[in-house]
Amino acid sequence: MRKTKLFMDTVVDIQVVIRETESIEEAESKMDRAFEAFRKVEQACSRFSPESELMNACRIAEDSVWISPFLYEPLKFALEIAKLTDGEFDPTIGKTMEEQGYNRHYLTGKFNENLAADSVTYRDIILDEQSHTLNLNKPLVVDLGAVAKGFAIDLAANELKDFKGFIVNAGGDLFAGGVDPNGLPWKIGIQHPEKKDQLIEEIEIINEAICTSGSYERRNAKVPGMHHIINPKTKHSPNDWVSSSVVAPFAMMADAFSTAAFLLGSEKGKELIENAGLKGIFITSELQIVRVGGI
Amino acid sequence: MAKMDKKWVILCSTAVAAVYSAGFISTEAQATKVDSHYQAQVSNQAIGDSSSTVTSNNNQAKGNNSSIISSNSNQAKIDKSSIVLPKSNQTKRLYKDGTFTGMGGNRRGSIEVAVTIKNDKITDVEISNFDMHYSERDVVGLPNEVIQNQSSQVRNVSGATYSTEAFQDAVQEAISQAQNA
């Protein structure tokens, strides 16, 4: 059974493999709950909607705000990755993204513009584990683009874990659970960066996530060479890789690490994935395939 | 292969657990589930037709809405023609509640969406029909790599984000049908 909806400017496609003994109603209600996870995470984490929990919290600088786990958890994860990469990956990139034109809501078409201090880093975001609160040192715009979708996929996957097999595919970031309708591991193609009708690679995964960060999608209309993955320190798009795919046990992990590896470039990016014990497939601008972690 | 750094696995699994332990995912969806065997048989026949939508008599794919696309390059200007769903403090609702379909498309194919509106807010956008090449080049005779929404045989691809311009057109069309006169 298969259903497709639109969330987070992304086509979210959920497929489940149903056993003969399972009822269609039960399957449908589980799929609805999986989609509901996307709705909840989007309402909490969207940088494009002024009413999101995130944007409401961003308007309150220098004061503590309680935030729900739908926002707290992905933000906490993003801050850990920021620490790990010494700020090459940084969720305070939001204002820079807005300035580059990535601030338009995909459903309403409205532009979202917010105040931010000139110089901000992830160290200006303070989370308190005890009170579950967020405190911003100065006005800034948080962008959770590299973790929120992954988190929603993981929550959706948790709703579907009892199926014999399932796939939660959010615009090519996906979690494949169990086995495919033929009882085999799920085969996942990796998009060719230049030829859209072709795959550059194919892998098999079971109960794992794969996320791909590519510079070939969402290119900047105004500035040639720029795309939606921007280094917060240089404010430029790195171009060592054209595509960075990471396989991990959780989609939030695969999502954040594929973006971080893209930002870090060839040497440091490979090292990051090796040190975390993950698997990655990277494509250079000359279309060379670089494999990491025994994949 | 290096041993996996458990720290990240633990962070992810506690993140998922945190949502549940706080009771943030409700069981409302399950309450609506229908239990009778008769119902199960009926909807068995209906698999493959997931769109339970208010059908409208739009039979043409709308072309690209140039005002939306052009506004992309001018971020300071707010596009007046775009959908602005009003705040709830307005007494009269501008949109009817319900599910409305709309079509969008480009040279690569067409998309049909079912948009659900409640209290002047978009609550859901389901893709009820998706028939598109995901080739950027519009060349006749390219391998027919078409995604058919209801087929389970479609290959999964990592790294392919579809253009949402066609979706935007489809959503706009659906919303225009919801508009109160």
Image (cartoon, coloured by chain):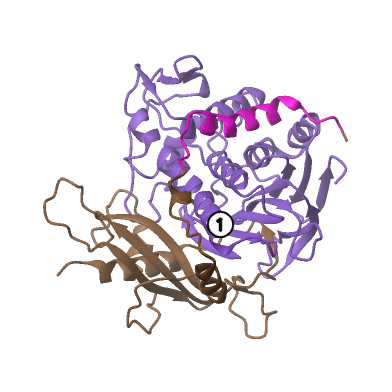
Tag 1 residue: A26
Q: Nearer the viewer, residue B163 or A221?
A: B163
Q: Judge whether B62 appears above or below B32 on screen.
A: below
Q: Main secondary structure of the magenta part?
A: helix
Residue lying farthest left?
B91
Q: Residues within 10 Å of mark 1 (few under 14, many from 20)?
A: some
Q: Nearer the viewer, residue A235 or B40?
A: B40
Residue B130 visible in the current orientation: no
Task: Name the side, left or right, on which A218 lies relative to A139.
Answer: right
Q: Position of residue A235 (x, y in %)?
A: 53, 36
Q: Which residues are magenta?
A: B2-26
Quadrant in the rendering for residue A263: top right
Please name whichever residue, B130 or B109, is drawn nearer the observer in this view of the structure.
B130
Residue at the image point whose x is 48% and y is 19% from the top: A127
Give the percent coordinates (x, y) of residue B32: 43, 54
Looking at the rendered image, the quarter that the N terminus of chain A falls into is bottom right
Among all residues in the image, which is located at the extreme top? A130
Residue at (21, 52) in percent of width and height: B86
Where does residue B96 sit, x and y in percent of width and height? 23, 64
Q: Chain of mark 1?
A: A
Residue in view at x 51 percent, y 19 percent = A123
Q: Is residue A131 above or below residue A232?
A: above
Residue A173 visible to an observer of this rendering: yes
* Chain in purple on the image: A
Q: Colour of chain B?
A: brown
A191 up-or-down from A65: above or below: below
Q: Is residue A278 magenta?
A: no
Place residue A279 in its image quadrant. Answer: top right
As shown in the figure, which amino acid type bears the numbered disc 1? Glu
Q: Residue at x 19, y 47 (%)?
A: B88
Residue B174: horizontal and vertical position, in percent? 33, 69
